[in-house]
Amino acid sequence: NNYQFLFRKICLILGFFSVHWLKAHNLETGEAVLTLSDDRVWILELDINLTKYILSNPDLADGVRSEYRLLEDEGGFNEHNFNRWELLFVKCETQFRKEMLVLDSGEPFEEYEFSFPHPSKLTQKTYTAMLQEGLHIKLNAAGRLTSRSAPIQFRFPVDIGEVILTTILPKAQWMMTGEVSQSVTLASSGVQLEKQGFFATFSRFLGIGFIHIVPRGLDHILFVLGLFLLSARLRPLLIQVTVFTAAHTLTLGLSIYGLVSFPSSLVEPLIALSIALVVVENVFTEKLHSWRNLVIFIFGLLHGLGFAGGLSEVGLPQGQFLTALISFNVGVEVSQVSVLLFAFILLGTFRDKDWYRKKLTIPLSCLIGIIGLFWAIERAIG
């Protein structure tokens, strides 16, 4: 019937995401390292997932994408397909160079060298290893500032996603997809990042916090859905989310300020296990119990440690430390609320039906629990 069809559809959606987002905390960011020397020479080393770029870029859809799929199926480059691989890399290099933007003192700067590795520069062993996890390559660009005081900025192609740009100090900045980086300038005290105002910092880290849940944090999404499935009533859900928020805010703040520290090898399996445990109650009880909020608080402490690990990859700006921390947390909450709203839209109208618990709460809770246990085992042994 229609309800069974709805359930199967939801299971297929969750199954799809569990396969494609298996590494639920993997932000899949590009990494860039910028070196500035006293003689005004700058060198940029950029590590990207070329597979992601090829499959996402609409300008590579005709010809390059289909050719890549064919070559991928052949398992690597050899004497028979080497020239085809070489041509594919040349086309990718041309498109990438066209989309990459370097700004010197706010003006486009074209006089820089650009190096894009081709198959001829990769060993068969290296290439095969990269192909198994997506084709990761390292690009290089180098140029000279027009003056010591000239600020330099970069904008990378949209289809490589977010990028963490680090200078030699190191100072890090998170570049949202398609945006221009903060200015980096040589100074007597060394490399300096452009200082951003309150609203720029707030909006930047608000976005980082949001994408840490949607779409990057499938484990956190499943945890929130686990809370929703037992009781789709607004008031108890708001109480649970508030408890969860208070808990992860506490450990997030303590971790960022260096007062609490736990290895990710311990935190990540426990976060995955919390997903499985929170849905156990969904299966064995039909109503909320007083201890649930305590359990949620404990699990919230764990998730806060996980958020801290993600935020440490980004780096917090000096002078705007507290602003960035608060806005990141606000972004997380907005993202979590959006997940709950989506769940209400999809399932809320069925919550008073006699079959809701039997056909939705229990099966979906079991599915989420299985995914959580799988992640817990994978992270523990991985």
Image (cartoon, rainbow, N blue to C red):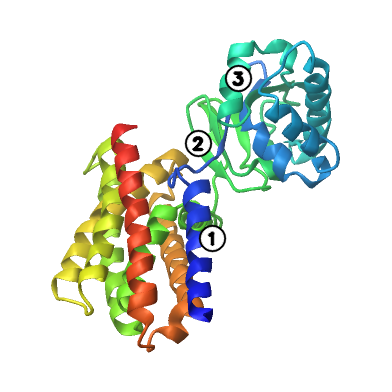
Viewer-side residue, 61 vs 106: 61
Residue found at x 39% / y 84%: 351
Q: Residue furthest left?
A: 291
Residue found at x 20% / y 74%: 285
Residue 103, percent across and down?
74, 37
Q: Which residue is mark 2?
A: 172
* Crowdedness near tag 1: few (<14), some (14–19) or many (≥20) residues, C-alpha within 10 Å: few
Q: Is residue 260 left or right of residue 164?
A: left
- Asked if 160 appears above or below 3 in the picture, the reply is above
Q: Which residue is mark 3?
A: 128
Viewer-side residue, 79 vs 188: 79
Residues under labels 1 and 2: Cα distance? 19 Å
Of labels 3 and 1, earlier in sequence is 3
Q: Amino acid at mark 2?
A: Ala
- Pair 2/3: label in front: 3
Residue 233, percent across and down?
34, 83
Which label is found at residue 199? 1
- Asked if 51 appears above or below 119 in the picture, the reply is below
- Asked if 72 appears above or below 266 in the picture, the reply is above
Residue found at x 64% / y 48%: 177
Q: Amino acid at mark 1?
A: Phe
